[in-house]
Image (cartoon, rainbow, N blue to C red):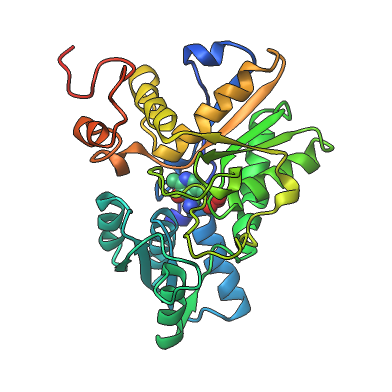
Amino acid sequence: MDAHDSLLELIGNTPLVRLRTPDAGRGATVYAKLEYLSAGGSVKDRIGLRMIEEAEKSGELRPGGTVVEATSGNTGAGLAMVAAAKGYRAIVVLPDKSSAEKIATLRAYGAEVVVRPGGLAQHDPEHVVNVAKRIAEETPGGWFSGQYDNPANPAAHYLTTGPEIWRQTAGRVTHLVSCVGTGGTISGTGRFLKEASGGTVRVIGADPTASVYSGGDGRPYFVEAAGRFRHPETVEDVWPDSFHQDVVDEILPVADRDALLTIRRLAREEGLLVGGSSGTAVAAALRVAAGLGPEELVVVMLPDSGRQYLSKYFNDEWMLRNGFLDGDPGGPRVGDAV
Ligand code: PMP
């Protein structure tokens, strides 16, 4: 039989597809890694599985236990899916900028959802991470998975995403472009590719313009789940342990507008329906590729599907209201007769 025993076997092993946008024709070839084709629909399935399995091994998570996490959504979905498949309870704390689709997905998996204001200072007791830690402590059998500091997060990518890309490109990859949220994807994947290539692969972060990772002032921005916001009361930025700065060669800022117009084009011109951070990453990857030769090969991570953002980035009213469609929207609008 050609069948699987468990859904958990369908996490990761995502395909690579060449981008065909006109800009991608200049310079190096760009291949996109389609993480939305993982079982739970995002790059975060990988860490949901690995964090839970490491906690089972260490005894921090026992049968009947409760998984608790603070997340902008995808880690929650990955954890909630694995928790459902393995019989754990899940509680997910989300910032209020998370899309309605993400919240509904978590509830569909049976997770309990707690929505708290986003954008609070890290030391604020109501910051989503502090709320999640408190819930884990107060819940019998509770375990806080802690994606920002859990070594299983970058390890998941070192052990799966990196080797997949190396194998899929037959070792020809020369550049990796990825957004940075917790930093797990870029750190684990980038470290593996650097080691496998003898240090020649260049690792480039793609970051929302205002995010502190690329030297921004930390003002709020619209792209979800990527970059890092800074509250005015923040005294010192604490970098997550999941982000290994030594692996990353460069971080490029990308404006929300570029990211969002990029995903609208990808959907129309290539049939790739992906989320906002994929736009941040592709806009950066196309910039990188334009400065390279045809013998070089750029791989860009596309973390999730556009279906989670239909009411925002793919909704013309939302785009107009937020000033992203005041110029040339880059082709026909969604909903235009063709
Ligand atoms: N984009 C999306 C849509 C995500 O959910 C995440 C994970 N928070 C990222 C980018 C960033 O990935 P990482 O946390 O591994 O840096």
Q: Quadrant of residue 257?
A: top left
Q: Is residue 141 left or right of residue 334?
A: right
In percent of the image, x 57 and y 73: which residue is there?
A: 55
Residue 163 coordinates in the image, percent (x, y):
68, 42
Q: Is residue 157 above or below residue 15?
A: below
Q: Is residue 196 left or right of residue 212?
A: right
Q: Is residue 7 above or below residue 164?
A: below
In percent of the image, x 37 and y 22: which residue is there?
A: 265
Q: Is residue 55 left or right of residue 319?
A: right
Which corner quadrant holds the N terminus?
top left
Q: Quadrant of residue 316?
A: top left
Residue 85 coordinates in the image, percent (x, y):
40, 64
- Work out whether residue 45 or residue 99 is closer to the camera in this orientation and state it: 99
Q: Is residue 88 left or right of residue 164?
A: left
Q: Residue furthest right?
A: 198
- Work out whether residue 189 or residue 49 is closer to the camera in this orientation and state it: 189
> Can I make out residue 11 in this image?
no
Residue 90 coordinates in the image, percent (x, y):
37, 71
Q: Residue furthest left?
A: 337
- Work out whether residue 211 or residue 19 is closer to the camera in this orientation and state it: 211
> Can I make out residue 41 in this image?
yes
Residue 110 coordinates in the image, percent (x, y):
28, 66
Q: Is residue 23 above or below residue 109?
A: above
In percent of the image, x 70 and y 20: which residue is there?
A: 296
Which corner quadrant holds the C terminus?
top left
